[in-house]
Image (cartoon, grey):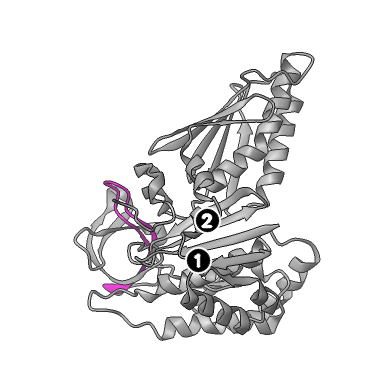
């Protein structure tokens, strides 16, 4: 049974935790007034760097943005054009921009300047995929736009998908820029869609929220998109006590920062994070799960798979991740570990690309990072801040 807990702080930051029975399944934070990802701006060419295959763009802030040539629509000849932030600045790195503007709906993603894109989520297979292949070719969208059908579109008909397309197209046509030529409300709308997508994809049984305005917005969207079976699952948390404290979720969230995670068999996982990559070491410790070393190594590695994927999801690791498995000499055992890892990772919400185990027992994977604001808490490592909305104190 999955439950979703949503805490809206005084600063209007939104903290969301999904519990699977008594276990933390998913956790993320949205800082509505700090997060610039997905915001859209008017960009102006500042200078061209051929050595970097990129252009530096003035988008209304002191530090210019980084726009690689590969992210530029070839037919754009204007000096001033729309750009979207796809990655926020990290330390000395500038924000990463694109001219392929995405509008994220509940069931679809509409992409400006990519008219040849017509894709369906890889997580949709079988008869549902065959049916959607026919529908996607019939959906009416402008000639300068592409479309991706999201995982939530799996059981939807053409009328429902066309409605979502029309909403995103309308948002594009009605864009209104503020004084510094940016669009603020894009992010605010995205969080509602994000919450509802999580409710649908994870098939949430109960949603507990401490803010009536947010409840009304979510219910209106669910009713509008005819997801009525979730309406009665939403409950208002009236108690003045913090939700995460009341349901003892803060304690489970604090474990995100632990460097070591113990497994049932006595083995453990060690996490080491750097700016460039994340390393996960599988340590056999006191584990004896086989007749010999090879069998023990395989069984311990196999046991660690589900926990590794769970930890990657909860900690929201992104980029390159290297898993240091206990070395196995049997090639068949290596292939089994690769197969089970790929099979399990397909169920994940984020995009995970899995490589092959090297002769040293290293498995290299890459993962799409879903959220950025949890990084602030990771750096601070302040458990008192959880559930309060106070990232700094």
Residue at image position (42%, 85%) is: 173
Picture coordinates of residue 337, whole percent (x, y): 70, 33
Q: Is residue 103 visible?
A: no
Mark 1–mark 2 CB contact (< 8 Å):
yes
Local crowd at mark 2 within 10 Å, few (<14), some, or many (≥20)? few
Q: Is residue 298 left or right of residue 56?
A: right
Residue at image position (28%, 52%) is: 50
Picture coordinates of residue 88, whole percent (x, y): 35, 56
> Which residue sits furthest left?
62
Residue under circle 2?
246
In the structure shown, which secondary structural element does the residue marked by tag 1 occupy?
Answer: loop
Q: Does the magenta-highlighted stretch encompass residue 392? A: no
In the structure shown, which secondary structural element does the residue marked by tag 2 occupy?
Answer: helix
Residue under circle 1?
239
Picture coordinates of residue 221, whole percent (x, y): 57, 80
> Which residue sits furthest top?
292
Nearer to us in this view, 231 or 81: 231
Q: Is residue 346 visible?
A: yes
Tell me the quarter of the image containing the N terminus. bottom right
Nearer to us in this view, 334 or 1: 1
Determine whether 248 is above or below 124 in the image.
above
Nearer to us in this view, 280 or 245: 245
Separation of residues labelled 1 and 2 (CA atoms)? 9 Å
Magenta region = 79-98
């Amino acid at each position: 049974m999955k439950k979703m807990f949503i805490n809206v702080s005084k600063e209007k930051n939104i903290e969301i935790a999904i519990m699977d029975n008594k276990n933390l399944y998913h956790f993320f934070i949205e800082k509505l007034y700090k997060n610039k990802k997905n915001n859209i701006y008017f960009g102006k060419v500042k200078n061209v760097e051929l050595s970097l295959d990129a252009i530096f763009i003035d988008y209304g802030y002191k530090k210019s943005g980084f726009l690689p040539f590969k992210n530029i629509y070839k037919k754009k000849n204007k000096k001033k054009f729309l750009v979207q932030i796809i990655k926020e600045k990290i330390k000395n790195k500038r924000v990463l921009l694109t001219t392929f503007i995405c509008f994220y709906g509940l069931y679809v993603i509409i992409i400006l300047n990519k008219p040849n894109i017509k894709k369906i989520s890889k997580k949709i297979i079988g008869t549902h995929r065959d049916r959607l292949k026919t529908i996607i070719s019939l959906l009416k969208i402008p000639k300068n736009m592409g479309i991706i059908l999201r995982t939530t579109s799996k059981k939807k008909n053409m009328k429902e998908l066309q409605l979502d397309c029309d909403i995103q197209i309308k948002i594009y046509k009605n864009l209104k820029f503020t004084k510094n030529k940016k669009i603020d409300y894009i992010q605010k709308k995205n969080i509602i869609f994000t919450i509802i997508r999580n409710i649908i994809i994870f098939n949430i049984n109960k949603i507990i929220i401490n803010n009536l305005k947010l409840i009304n917005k979510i219910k209106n969207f669910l009713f509008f998109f005819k997801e009525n079976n979730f309406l009665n699952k939403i409950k208002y948390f009236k108690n003045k006590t913090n939700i995460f404290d009341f349901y003892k979720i803060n304690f489970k969230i604090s474990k995100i920062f632990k460097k070591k995670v113990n497994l049932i068999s006595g083995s453990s996982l060690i996490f080491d994070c750097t700016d460039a990559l994340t390393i996960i070491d599988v340590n056999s410790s006191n584990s004896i799960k086989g007749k010999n070393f090879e069998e023990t190594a395989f069984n311990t590695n196999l046991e660690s798979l589900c926990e590794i994927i769970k930890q990657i999801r909860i900690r929201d690791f992104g980029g390159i991740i290297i898993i240091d498995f206990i070395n196995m000499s049997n090639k068949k055992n290596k292939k089994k570990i690769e197969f089970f890892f790929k099979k399990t990772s397909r169920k994940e919400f984020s995009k995970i690309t899995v490589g092959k185990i090297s002769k040293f027992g290293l498995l290299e994977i890459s993962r799409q990072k879903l959220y950025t604001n949890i990084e602030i808490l990771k750096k601070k490592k302040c458990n008192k801040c959880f559930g309060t909305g106070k990232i700094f104190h």
